[in-house]
Amino acid sequence: MPEDDELLIIAATGDLILDVAQEQGGQQYAYRVDSEVLKAKSRYFEKLLSDRFNEGRQLSAALHALRTSGHESIAEAPIGVLPRVAIVNVGRTALAKAASIQNLIADFLRALHGLDLATPSPPISNISNLAVVADRFDAVPCLASYVRRRKFLQLIDAKAKGKPNLTLTEERVRQKLFVGLYFDQSSWVSKYSKLLIMRDSVQWRPETEEDHTKALWWDIPNGVEDELIKRREYILETINSLQAHFLGLYTSGERQCKLGYDTSLQCDSFQLGEMVRFFHKIDTVRLQGKIYDNTEPVYYLGDIERLLASLRQCSNYQVDANHAHCGLRSRLLPLLDLLQNQLSLENGSMDIGICAECWHNGRSEYAWSLAKRPVLWAHPRTSTGTPSSGQRNGQDRKTSSCTSRHVIVRDWFMAMDRHWSL
């Protein structure tokens, strides 16, 4: 049991001492708190301190004894006679030092009591750890309201204004996504989920072993982590299908050069050779024999924007002066622009990121991980293509939410087959 001189006073007139440790038998830290505040702000404490649990019954008995013992008020009672409740495990935080745990729980309890935190403008690392503790003690709505009132997230955005996203480590991206999800900051959810999808994660590598001791944001719960993985896989599959589309065209035997010259056949052969050489050079295609193939599936690791930039480097190869526009470049770039409109981190759509409203309110209709794959996607300029002008199946897309817009993008990336030709 902590010594009284180590007691942190959260509520000067509090009627309860909390003894908190991160693990069984670990160092405890004591806090004087108001039990009624805890029950009102945390569903965990509401249950724990009720008559349904031994802790609640002991608390009621101890407070009754204090009121009938001659003390004018519980506030004036000696610390040593106040009831105590022990708490073990404060959640999967990123804190290893015991003193940091002590300060974190103190801030959590201050927030529940509506008091100022130890740091007036806490950094994202502090807020993300508070979100973990709030989740552990089922007090997320209270902490979310507290963080909004204090404008902590707006202050963090103001400090980061003008700084490129590339300066953010993966942990910072994950912390901001985690906080956005838990504390209702929808702009953070869409922005940082997209950033994580585009940049990849060390957690998604095949060789990475599951580690339940790491902070909670390294394995974001409630299906979010699996959703991010699924979205990235479908996006990579879509980009791969674009490459496969052109290789298929030039190996099909169908004439691609439209000039009608005697050199058209040579032009097609030349373009196929240059195309294969280019894709092999940027390491997006593997030449593998099929007589005996024992290779494992390989996924692109790294930034998807960098991948698109590599594809844009294709030269406008030509077999002779008459074939200035027969190459891959003139046909590939417009399709890369179409992808870039969705995938760009600077000015692209946010539809590939997670929309907090749709995720929380209509996940079954919205989530990529729950959706049935469409059979076909065709280029929007074709008569059979998915509309991109706000019309779908002849109906005006005016709904109370943005789900239908997200679904149009989802269907593109999830399609089992894609017709890229105009």
Image (spheres, rainbow, N blue to C red):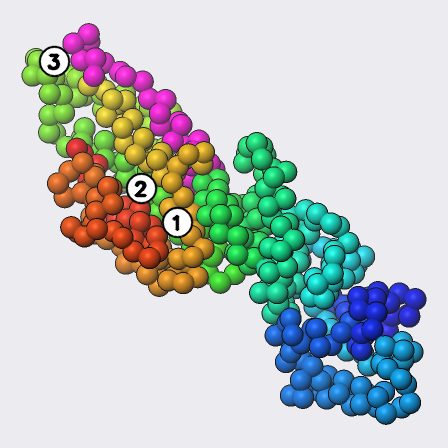
Secondary structure of the residue carrying tag 3 is loop
Secondary structure of the residue carrying tag 2 is helix
Real-space Cα distance between discs 1 and 2?
A: 11 Å
Identified at 18% across, 13% down, the residue is 323
Identified at 31% across, 49% down, the residue is 405
Q: Amino acid at mark 1?
A: Arg
Q: Amino acid at mark 3?
A: Thr
Front in this rendered view, residue 344 or 98? 344
Front in this rendered view, residue 121 or 134? 121
Q: Which residue is mark 2?
A: 238
Secondary structure of the residue carrying tag 1 is helix
Identified at 86% across, 82% down, the residue is 73
Q: Which residue is mark 3?
A: 263
Q: Amino acid at mark 2?
A: Thr
Contact? badges 1 and 2 (CB < 8 Å): no
Front in this rendered view, residue 286 or 323? 323
Specify the segment rendered in magenta.
Answer: 297-325
Q: Earlier in the sequence, mark 1 or mark 2?
A: 1
Q: Quadrant of residue 109?
A: bottom right
Q: Earlier in the sequence, mark 2 or mark 3?
A: 2
Q: Main secondary structure of the magenta part?
A: loop
Real-space Cα distance between discs 2 and 3?
A: 33 Å
306 with respect to 103 (left or right): left
Q: Position of residue 221 (x, y in %)?
A: 52, 61
Q: Which residue is mark 1?
A: 231
110 with respect to 155 (left or right): right
Contact? badges 2 and 3 (CB < 8 Å): no
